[in-house]
Amino acid sequence: MRSLSEIETVSKRSSRAAGYSWGIAEEVAKNIRLLEIFNLPGVKNLNSFFKKKKKLSLDMISAVNQDNVANRDGYCPIIAGVNVLDQIKTLEKLNQVNFKKVLYPLLFLPFISRATAVIGKRIFLKIDDKEFLLNFNNNIYSNYSKNEIIESANNVYLKVIENRDSFNDDEWNELYKLSEETFVEENESLKQGGAGAGLTDND
């Protein structure tokens, strides 16, 4: 089994050889490592993309809008991902963003996962009928578990999810009231025995 370090190094070098700058190649390497950690086929999709890249007519998006439509074969997943990550603070205000036709969309996914850590909010990502909930770049919940290559997606949709408690005020107050039973009333003995309360100064 290949180590994550090997995967990251080879992904970085192959991305540079495929025509991306060293900076972008480094981002791709982090992404492929992330996909493999979450048991998603990063290496498989990256290898397939690079084998076909020269024959593809890629749209290289720069400014990301609420609705984005590719005019050629489809958006380059790497350039689209880099720009979403760079512009995520602005895109957060839009709440949702749509892309029509993204090539190799699994290579786009880890950029969005990393964006969740930047804004401190979860993002729901839908790639055609495949759904992903991206959680602060710590884990991914999905209805997709196949080890396959996805060459193209007609619709890619992402929605920023506002942070909300999973419980109501009554549940919180009840739990808090129970926690109060561990509180100890402070007395003179506790004050003297507490941290930093000794009578001798050793400084």
Image (spheres, rainbow, N blue to C red):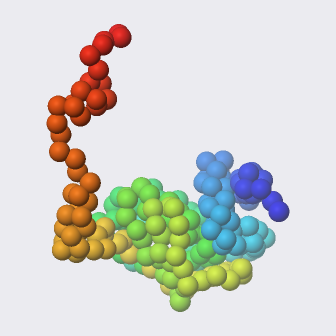
Q: In this view, does 24 lie to the left or right of 160?
A: right
Q: Is residue 86 placed above or below 41 in the rendered structure? A: above
Q: Is residue 59 above or below residue 30?
A: below
Task: Return the residue nearer the eye: 170 or 188.
Answer: 188
Residue 49 falls in image quadrant? bottom right
Image quadrant where residue 97 sits: bottom left
Tell me, yes or no, if residue 80 can be seen here: no
Tell me what residue is drawn at x 53 percent, y 67 percent.
139
The quadrant in which residue 89 appears is bottom left
Residue farthest toward the right in the current orientation of the protein: 1
Q: Can residue 200 be seen in this view?
A: yes
How many numbered dots are placed on residues in this image? 0
What x and y, as percent, mark residue 36?
68, 66
**Which is nearer the eye, 63 or 182?**
182
Of all residues shown, which one is farthest toward the bottom?
Answer: 129
- Report x, y in % for residue 130: 55, 85
The answer to whether 65 is drawn above or below residue 195 in the figure is below
In the foreground, 57 or 76 = 76
Q: In this view, does 196 lie to the left or right of 108?
A: left
Residue beneath the point at 59% across and 75% down: 105
* Residue farthest along the front direction in this orientation: 189
The quadrant the C terminus occupies is top left
Residue ID at (66%, 72%):
40
Q: Nearer the viewer, residue 136 or 125?
A: 136
Q: Position of residue 7 (x, y in %)?
A: 75, 57
Residue 69 against residue 11 in the figure, above or below: below
Question: Residue 174: where, in percent of width, then height?
Answer: 21, 70
